[in-house]
Each structure stands twice: as C-alpha cells, then as structure tokens.
Amino acid sequence: MFGARNNTLEEKSTHTHLAVANNSSPAAFSEVLKRYTELTQAINLEHPGEIRDYPSLLNLAIHHYLQTLLARLAELGKLEGNALEVAFNPILEAQWRLTQGSALDIFNNPDNVANSCLKEIAKLIYPGLTEEGLLLKLAPGIKKITQAVYVNPAQGKMDFELKTEAIHPETLEEIPPDDCIVVNDTLFSASSLFACFNKFDFTKKMRRELEQKYPEIYAELIEKRDDIGRVFEVLKQERPSPREAITRLMNALKYSRSRFSGEAKAAPLAEYELAGFRKYLNSLESNLQKQVYQLTCSGAGSKSLETIIKTDLVKEGDCVETAAGNLSGILENVENTPTLDARPPQPSPEELRKSFKEAIKPFKGNEKGEYLYPAKKSFKIPTELTDPLLKNIKIQDATHLIVFLQNLDVDYLKKLPPDEVNPFIRDAEELQYVLFHLDPLKQKAFCRYAAQNLKLFFSIKNSVDVLKNANSEQRLLILDILKDRLLSKGNQAGLIQDNWAFNQFLGLLDERELNLVLPTLRELLLAPENQHFLGRWEFRRLLFKEKATVYLTALGPLYLRSVIRNAEDLWEWERNLPSLAAVQVLHEQLGQRSNAQPSLFQAPQIDEAFIKRYEGHKYSQHLVLGEPLEAKEMVAANPNLLLAEEEVIDYFGRHIKQPAYELPRCIEDEEMAEMQEPYIDQLENSREIKEKLEALERWIESTGGFEDPQRETKDKVALINLVEALKKAETPEALKLAEDEFRTHLKSQTGVIIRKGKHCNTKLLDQASALYDDEYQALGGRDYNTSPKNDSLWVCGIGTIQSSFTTCYAQALGQSLYDRLEELKENKPQSRSLEFRYDRGVFLFPLVPGIGLGYKYASGSVATRARMGGLQRGLGELGASSLLDRLCQAKTSAFRALRRRPDNPSKRGCSIM
C-alpha cells in the first residue's frame, strides 16, 4: 500500500512534461514552477478527505510541503544570476533543517516530488554541478564524511581505521545515497564497513571504535541497518538465559498476530524468532539443552518445551496463541526457576568466529555480486508537516496505529486523537502488543500518552493489569500520571473505589514506586471519603502482610499521627502488624519530630509483657482467621501460646476472648484442633487442659454450644420475621427495611465479647434454605431475575448467614462443600483460600458492605457465576444446605474422635454421613 500510493507522487514528478529546462533564464525558472504547480492542483483533486493509513499521511505531507516550497520559490521568479543564487541558498538550508533524517531527506528519498522540484531548480541555478555536487548542494548542513578505510602501518601489515575528513562532491562518487547515515553535520558510509567484514579482528575493532567514539552514528546505524546490527550483536558475546530467550519467543508469538503456525500460515515475526530460538537451543551445552527441552508448565497434561518447539510450532494449523500460552506457563512454573535462570557459558572464540561467518553471509552478495539487503528507508514525517493534517486521521486497526507510532516524531504522539486510538487499545494485552513494536523512546512516550488520554486507564482493574505487564521504567511513568487520580478528591471520584482494589494496587508496588505514589495518597487518605482504605483492620492486615516496614515508612509520621491518636488506636495498629520489627518501625515513625508537627508520642516499651500480649493475640488471630500454617509455626516455637487469652476479631466482626486451646472447637475447625494436640502434650498442665476440652465438648453437645441459650431460637425468629416482612413488602423501601432488620439482628453478635462456646449458628443456613424452597411461590414464584422478594431472601437471608460463618466454614463454602467432603474422605487437608474456587477474583472475606456477600450475592445452588453488578444467587456450588449438614456432622465426629483417642494417636478418623 505504501509503495503504491507514494509512487503516485514520485511518478508524476518524472513524467516527460516535467523534463528539465536547459537554461537558467527567468522564463525557464517560471516554467518549472508552473509545471509543479499544475501537478499540485492535480493532486488536490485526488487526495482523500480523511487519512486512513500512514502512506496516505506521508503523501499528503509531501504534497503540502511542495505547495509551501513552491510559494517560497515563486518569490525568486524575477531574480537572475548571483541574486538568484543568494536568495536560493536560505531556502535550501531551511528545507535541509526540516527534512534531515525524515522520509523527505534527499538521501533517503531523492525522487519524491518535492526533492525533484528542488533538483530541477538547482540545475538551473548551478548548471555545472555533477550529480554528487547537486546532492551536497541540497544537503547544505553536511560538512564531514566518516568511513572505514584501509591503512598501511609501518610494519606493512594491512589494517582498517575510521577516518573523518571534510566532504567534497568527489567523495560521494562511490557512495549511493541510500547507503548514507547522516548525523548532525556528518555523513557516514555504511558500505565502507563491508570490506572490514572480511576479517573478524577488523570488524571487532570497527564496532568498538564506532560505539565509543561515534555513539550517535552507531545508534543510527543499528536502527537503519538491521544487517549490520546482527553482525555487531554477534560480537557483543552476550548469550541470554533460557528465561530471556523463551520470553522473547513468547512475545514474538503473542504479538505476531498470527493465529496458526506451520510454514504456510505463520507470520514473519513468529517464523523469524522461532528460527533464532532453535539456533539458541542448538548452541547450549548438551545437559542444559536437555533440561531446557524438558521444561513444562505446572499441572497435569502440560506440554514440554520440546513438544512445543519440535511439534506444535511445526504442524501447519496448530495454534500460535496456544503455544504462547504454554510458554507463559513454563515461565510461571516456579519448579523451572533453576533451569530458566541458568546463565549459559559465553561463546568461545571459535564459536564466535563461526557465528560471525554466518552473520556476514548477506554481505557476500549473490552470484552477480549484488548486495542482498538494501538499507531501510525512513518513513518519518517532520512534525511541522503533520500538525495541519491530524484532524483528518482515521486509524483503521492496530497495525495501522503501530505504523503511525513508529514513524511519527515522539513529540507528536501526544497530539494523536484519543478517539482514534481508544478502539484499538482496550486492555493491557493490546497495549503491550503496540509497545512491543516500538523502540524504547517511543514506548516511554506512548505509555505517557496512554495513561493521560486513553479510556484503558479509567479503570483500576485495567490499570493494574497494565502495571503487571509493564517494565519498571514504564511503571514509573504510568504511576506518576495516575497518582493524582487514584483516590477521590472533592467531587471527583477516584479510580480506586473499594478496599480490595486499594490493597491489590499498593501490593503491586515496590519501595521506589511507593515513594512516588504515597506522598500524594497520604493527603488524600485523610479526606473523609477515603479514610476507610486504611481504617479497617482486615484490609490493613492484608496490605501490611508482605511489606509492612516499607508501607509504614512511606506513610510517614504526619499521616500516622493523624490516625493514631490514643493507646487504643495504637494497639489496633500494633496487633495487626506481621512482626515486632514492623511494630518498632511504627513506634519510630510516631516518635519522629518535625518543625511542622513536634512529636508528643512516647513509644511504649517492647518488653516481655508486650511481646507476650502481641504474640498471644497474633496466634489467636491466626486460629480465628483460618491460617493453620502460620499458627503451627508460632506454637511449635512456643507451646505456651496455647494458654493465651487475648481479645481478637473475626471477619464477621465478632469480638472473641477465649483461651487459644479452646478456639478450634469453638470455631469448629477440626484441623486446627488436631494441629494443637501435640503441643498441648508439651504443657505442664496438659492433663488439666484436656479435661477442660472434654468438658467443653460435652457442654456443646448437650446444650447446643452457645453462651446465650436462646441464640438458635432468636436467630430462627429473626429469619421467620424476615420472610413475613418480605411477603408484606410492596415497595423497594419496604424490602430494604426488612433486609436491614435481619442484618441488624445477626450483627448484634458483634456488640458483645464472646467468652464461651461456639461462634456461628450453621443450622440457620439449613433453615433459611428450607424457607426459601417452601415460600418460593408466596414470594413471587417467578424466575429469580424478576422476583425481588425471592432475591431479597436469597441474597440478604442466605447471603448474610453465610457472611456470619466462621472462617473454616467460609473457606469450605468458597472451595465447594462437595469438594471439601471429598477431601475429608481421602483425609486431605482443607484448602484455606478465601477466593471462590470457581469464581476467581471474588472473595468471601473480608466483607465489603453494600457490594459483597449478603448484599449482592449469596453462595449456593442456583447459579455458579457471579453477577457482581446486580442481584444474583451464584458463587459456589450445588446443593449447599444438605452438603453443609453433612460437613457439620463430619466435624462433630472428628472432634469426638480427637477427644477419645490415645495420647499418641497415629491418625485421625473422620466419618462422613
């Protein structure tokens, strides 16, 4: 497409009616201008009303440039002799400054219509110029030439060196225009290097001297001459790790936009990189090569790298996208890390010379002595010529967008119409596809443009996806732009709307990125509409789990003193920090003095009493929040933690103060109870504790197990009242009132400290499920999409009950009650994730009022996918109530067996009804 359209302008410039006049009279001068003016008028009738691809933009820019040029040349029409020459020279200098290094450059495209016009005029004014002299006249900025030349040292041994001298027309006689690399006032002859390529040592010397003494020429040479770049790359002696090589191949497959492999259908980029990867594998030492071929994704049935390379990417019709996905799985498999990060030995001199001979083959030419790979022409357009044309750009697809970005100046990118770019960059993968095809400078510029202008960054989810795939430099650019938009500011809503998104976003950032973002966030976090982000202990605990000291340092003393005002606030922060080291950092931050806010804070002593309280709370919290690995690590180091009796809070908000050894039975977590058994035996009063546990078990079985003996009755009455209120409700307001009353009843549990017995009434879920079935017709009887009363019972009734579950029950619910029962049959440990197994990205806890469990969904038996935007009853698996009853029975049996077995049991028994 490019060649066809551009040649229209080039061909019209060489028609016979544009033949060069043979005299320099004003009449001849005017005749040339007249003919080119007629050409522009003809082009005006042809060019499209809108620019749909880069070639049409280039042609239109050349056409507009010609019109501007003709207007300036018309002013010279009445001049002759020396006056004409004096007036013409500034025009040549201006056009050289404008076009140097672009598609209009006389060396890059000598035959475009504008350059043809200038050459005709120059021949009239300087009739005696040779072709080389004419070339230099049209490039007045060039003063020097640099090329590789032979030298004869005193010893008589032939050598090469880079030589720079003043340029003259005769020096261009052997250098074709498209061989020239122009940088500032210097022209470099790329073909002068070809003679060096006859000898390995000459080429090494040339590459080193170019990179060190002429870095600008070296960079331009690498960009415009891939063939020379490949030779120089061999000489760098850098062999990548398997991870680097596989990543390069994966990206090439992903971004080649080729769906199928096999020679007939794979895109050139995929084919080229696959060939290079096979060469890389063949260059590896045999043992490492074997290990690399055996790399696989995690999981059953995954393919090895050998299968992907030798079979999948050879068969015509196999999917390139699938192969790229399998390569990604290989990179993500942590078991592959040692092999992926192995650094192969650098090539020996013999291997380098062999690779060098392969790389210089193109420079040998064909049987006619013709060089096989001509230089790439520049397609760049000077910004001054593109500005007037931007309003007419209509981008057709991502490929056309990439061509625009590759050839437009960096400064121009910010002027691209966002409405034309948005349709082709809708997610992180599409952005990476575009960035993959740009040079590093353009990547930075386009990242900045995208973050400032594109709809992609109006969503925190998409923004997080982009950050996950961006390199560190790109991330900093994007974060610097997004930081002011992250949280709400006055009437302007922020990108981050809930705690999950806040934690997920900050969890991505390293220390450097946090220091960039948090100074802005600190101020915004103090606003009333944003205080909840660090105000809830559950989310703060999750956020600080990995990088507590980094976050605390970044938040700084002014912010921390604004939210920690008394001893109660301080303990709430201290107890949810992951380590005593983090507690010490918190104290140091609070104790810092500044002119703006002198510290009145007296750091409490981290003495034995504090450590005992802190570790006792931490251990009990692990138990209540369903974290057995962390709990076991602590109690194994200090069995006396079983005696701790600190007040803790669960995800529902219940305040609990019970001995740690009792907690597993009271939260009904049989695995935690079994984990504690061997450490109870290590305590001095182990027999007394076991007697207390047996008494607790008997009390639970005989009374139902609640501190309030009316608890189950009260819950059932509240549930029946909800159903009756829903039946009577005639308006949305009445439905909401009924829902609020039921939630208030269940939440009343959080207003007292539980000191004895069980925490959660699981029977209430069975009762709610039965009522839902029995009252379905009475509450509307229609499909749940159009039955608001049934929706209310499902989401508020069943969902709120589920939100009150202790963590171990909630984990079983999210991972599928059926699967949990199957795990119990096989004596497998419980999965402890709070994420729904079949609805990734959706979590049971922490609870999010207004949008989470009990407000927008319930986990149960009608659907399996979340409809997070509206009422639904999905998330989970089938037959929830009957399965829950079986799980409760299994837990009861496990606790009975635990209390009755010998002191040194070999294995737990567990019956499933």
Image: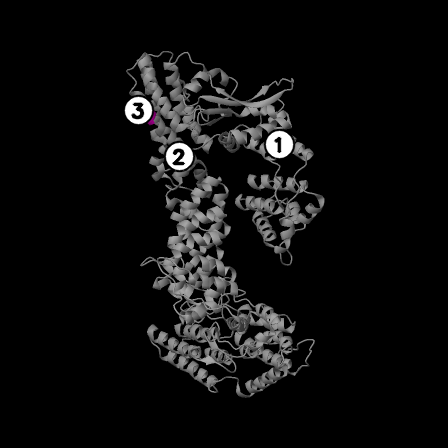
**Crowd class of label 1 (few under 14; some 14 to 19; many from 20; radius 10 Å):** some
State the separation of the CA atoms marked 1 and 2: 36 Å
Q: What element carries label 2?
A: helix
Tell me the crowding category of disc 3: few under 14, some 14 to 19, or many 20 or more residues within 10 angstroms, Cα based.
few
**Tag 3: residue type?**
Ala
Instruction: Name the outermost residue toward the right.
Output: 286
- What x and y, as percent, mark residue 811? 54, 70
Q: Earlier in the sequence, mark 1 or mark 2?
A: 2
Q: State the quadrant of the C terminus.
A: bottom right
Q: Distance between the residues labelled 3 and 1?
A: 49 Å
Near-viewer residue (109 or 222): 222
Tell me if residue 453 can be seen.
Answer: no
Question: Which x, y percent locates residue 900?
Answer: 65, 83
- Identify which amino acid the numbered label 1 is placed on: Ala
Which residue is under mark 1? 359
Select label 2 or label 3 by which is in front. 3
Label annotation for residue 57: 2
What label does residue 653 carry, if any? Answer: none
- Disc with the residue nearer the chain's start (2 vs 3): 2
**Position of 628 compared to 529: left or right?**
right
Magenta stretch encompasses residue 70? yes
Q: Left or right of 485: which side holds 372?
A: right
Which of the two residues, 589 or 24, is positioned nearer the viewer here? 589
Q: What stretch is highlighted in magenta?
A: 67-71
